[in-house]
């Protein structure tokens, strides 16, 4: 998506994607968490791509519940953790752990990340390919008709993500499954994979925060095939 897209434009484009869905369809919401070599300072490096798969009928109830728990229309888990709001993060994780049978959480994890130029982007591509490929197969989760992923900040990053999707489609990894990118300010359901990825990242780091404890029985992790440098 172009850098000039406002939230109003993003909202319109997303609404158009939603209108094409069947009432019984599922949507996958995708976000990530990572520790890259540049900031690891010798600690473990990893990339986590996370999908929350939800039926259309639950979208508005979950949006409403999330807004009620966080007390507003803005949320970013790492910021809340840095501000000392562990209580709300734990409450959100407990809420998500009570998911219904046709909701699902899927993760693709690569560790370590290659300590070389572009290693973080290669890890992202590998994780997204594994994650979206498994979503399309529909063996571990309900098969989504639409994937809504968080749009990255920089134009070069967004362009690279679009190339990754194009490569997957050409390789028949994701078939005709629609993939769109937007902001969590437009779609609060993107808070869910942000929360789950953050909780898993603390587990990967060996943290004793315990965010992932209630979620652990629901998390399904798919294997990631390491990308080769280009």
Image: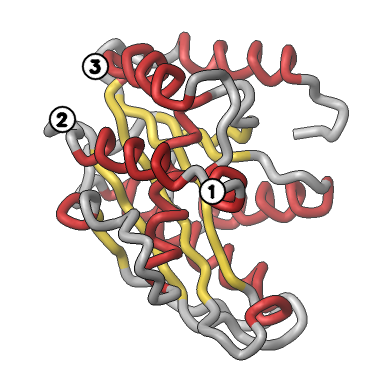
Mark toward the start of the polypeptide (3 vs 1): 3
Mark toward the viewer: 2 or 3: 2
Could you tell me residue 90's position as x and y percent? 34, 44
Callout 3: helix, strand or loop? loop
Q: Nearer the viewer, residue 217 or 26?
A: 217
Against 72, residue 27 (above or below) is below
Mark toward the start of the polypeptide (2 vs 3): 3
Do residues under tags 2 and 3 come within 8 Å of each other at their CB atoms?
Answer: no
Q: Residue at x 58, y 33 (%)?
A: 180
Callout 1: helix, strand or loop? loop
Q: Which residue is mark 3?
A: 24
Q: What's the CA distance linking mark 3 and mark 1?
A: 39 Å
Q: Residue at x 55, y 77 (%)?
A: 227
**Colouring method of the image:** secondary structure
**Which quarter of the rendering shows the N terminus?**
top right
Mark toward the viewer: 3 or 1: 1
Q: Which residue is mark 2?
A: 100
Is 94 situated left or right of 100 in this image?
right
How packed is label 3: few (under 14 Cα within 10 Å), some, or many (20 or more)?
Answer: few
Mark toward the viewer: 2 or 1: 1
Could you tell me residue 96's position as x and y percent? 28, 37
Q: Which residue is mark 1?
A: 84
Q: Residue at x 57, y 71 (%)?
A: 123
Mark toward the start of the polypeptide (2 vs 1): 1
Q: Nearer the viewer, residue 20 or 61?
A: 61
Q: Residue at x 72, y 55 (%)?
A: 160
Is 177 situated left or right of 31 in this image?
left
How packed is label 1: few (under 14 Cα within 10 Å), some, or many (20 or more)?
Answer: few
The disc placed on residue 143 is none
Do residues under tags 3 and 1 come within 8 Å of each other at their CB atoms?
Answer: no
């Amino acid at each position: 998506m172009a850098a000039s897209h406002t939230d109003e434009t993003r909202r319109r484009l997303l609404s158009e994607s939603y209108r094409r869905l069947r009432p019984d369809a599922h949507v996958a919401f995708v976000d990530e968490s990572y520790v890259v070599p540049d900031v690891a300072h010798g600690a473990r490096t990893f990339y986590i791509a996370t999908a929350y798969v939800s039926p259309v009928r639950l979208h508005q109830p979950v949006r409403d519940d999330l807004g009620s728990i966080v007390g507003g229309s803005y949320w970013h888990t790492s910021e809340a953790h840095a501000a000392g709001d562990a209580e709300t993060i734990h409450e959100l994780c407990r809420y998500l752990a009570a998911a219904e049978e046709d909701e699902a959480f899927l993760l693709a994890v690569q560790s370590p990340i290659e300590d070389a130029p572009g290693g973080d982007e290669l890890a992202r591509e590998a994780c997204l390919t594994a994650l979206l490929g498994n979503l399309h197969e529909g063996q571990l989760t309900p098969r989504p008709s639409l994937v809504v992923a968080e749009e990255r900040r920089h134009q070069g990053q967004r362009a690279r993500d679009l190339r990754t999707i194009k490569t997957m489609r050409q390789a028949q990894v994701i078939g005709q499954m629609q993939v769109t990118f937007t902001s969590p300010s437009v779609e609060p359901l993107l808070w869910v994979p942000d929360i789950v990825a953050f909780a898993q990242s603390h587990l990967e780091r060996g943290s004793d925060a315990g965010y992932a404890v209630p979620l652990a029985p629901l998390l399904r992790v798919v294997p990631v095939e390491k990308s080769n440098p280009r």
